[in-house]
Image (cartoon, rainbow, N blue to C red):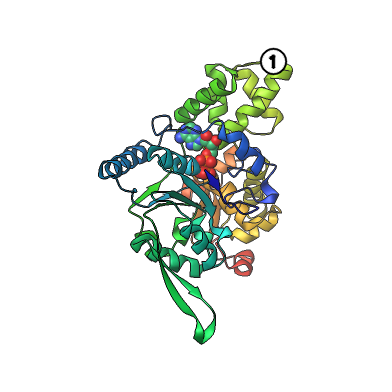
Amino acid sequence: MSQERDATPPGDTPAAAADRLVTPGADGDERALESALRPRSLDEFIGQERVREQLSLVLEAARGRGRASDHVLLCGPPGLGKTTLAMIIAAEMSAPLRVTSGPAIQHAGDLAAVLSSLADGEVLFLDEIHRMARPAEEMLYMAMEDFRVDVVVGKGPGATAIPLDLPPFTLVGATTRAGLLPSPLRDRFGFTAQLDLYQTEEIEQVLTRSARLLEVDLRRDGGGEIARRSRGTPRVANRLLRRVRDFAEVRANRVVTGPVATAALEVYEVDEQGLDRLDRAVLGALVRLFGGGPVGLSTLAVAVGEESETVEEVAEPFLVRAGLLARTPRGRVATAHAYRHLGLAPPRAGVPGGGVPEGSGGPGLFDLADGTG
Ligand code: ADP
């Protein structure tokens, strides 16, 4: 398998969030550790039943026809298995895999170089496809549809386009932000899969499998405890498992029981719902500084000393799903559940979950200054 990655692969952890135990992105070292835990076939892939079934039909049909599979778009938050699925697609098609990413493709020429070197039937995994340069995107349309690119040679009036035929290939695009993809690009994928956060029981299965591979003595209650704090994300689950394993080796006779997992995760400041310090800071700021909201994203990010992108992509998806934060057209709002989670009494019932205190009606100073939300 050939690899083609830029220095800081997208989907990777923004620097400010890199030291968070519950960040769903991964850095290079972690990706190396992860490769040992990746399921190698659709059968081994846990959860996402519908996606698995649909994808297995797509692949089986393609195999039956003896052709490269349709292009596949994988959407969903980091850490849910997009890269894993791309590798599985290649493996199930017995095809080589090429890996690259949107930010590595800054010019149409970068893409032309990748495309023109593909082998017949090769699977091209394009991570964070929404971050690819526009001119490359247009080249990709034609490559996906007609297996052809026009390579432009020269500049200005003398420039000529040389058509180049490509072998049939399968593009597997991955994105955390499907909404940012232009629709002509989205439409050229024959199959689009939306990956959702995993159920706790599915995460328990991921942990059981990982514990077996890592030779960790993980007891049932230990697995349950870690799963509940894993934010529905296999990557986070595997990471917490490694930290709990350290704790168990040093302080608990190597056996991971429920109480051992609880004690370990308390040391790492991951609370019983999987919230860490940043999540609690976001909720705390929302409730204590902004009266529960609504407040614009960038204002909230400044209040906790993070990039807006980190708050939006790392903390919020989980806070929203946990029913702690709501995104409204006027800004972020804390729910009643958020107040309770922080040990505070919720304000009188009002908006989603009863969260917005009465009287915070019109856009506040921060919203106006912010313009986002
Ligand atoms: P993404 O590309 O979406 O960020 P990855 O495919 O890199 O996520 O998955 C992150 C880690 O989680 C990998 O180590 C992988 O083994 C594990 N993982 C993801 N999905 C599953 C799954 N369905 N079953 C078991 N392990 C999984």
Left or right, 211 with respect to 73, comes to right
Q: Position of residue 276 (x, y in %)?
A: 65, 39
The answer to whether any part of residue 61 appears in the image is: yes
Q: Quadrant of the C terminus?
A: bottom right
Relative to 1, does residue 141 appear above or below in the rendering?
below
At a point 69% along the width and 13% down the height, the residue shown is 253
Q: Position of residue 260 (x, y in %)?
A: 65, 19
At mark 1, the secondary structure is: loop
Q: Residue furthest right?
A: 250
Label 1 CB less than 8 angstroms from ligand 1: no
Left or right, 240 with respect to 122, comes to right
Q: Which residue is mark 1?
A: 252
Relative to 372, does residue 342 appear above or below in the rendering?
above
Q: Residue furthest top?
A: 253
Report the front residue among 151 and 79: 151
**Badge 1 density bin: few <14, some 14–19, many ≥20, Cα 10 Å:** some
Report the amino acid beneath label 1. Answer: Ala
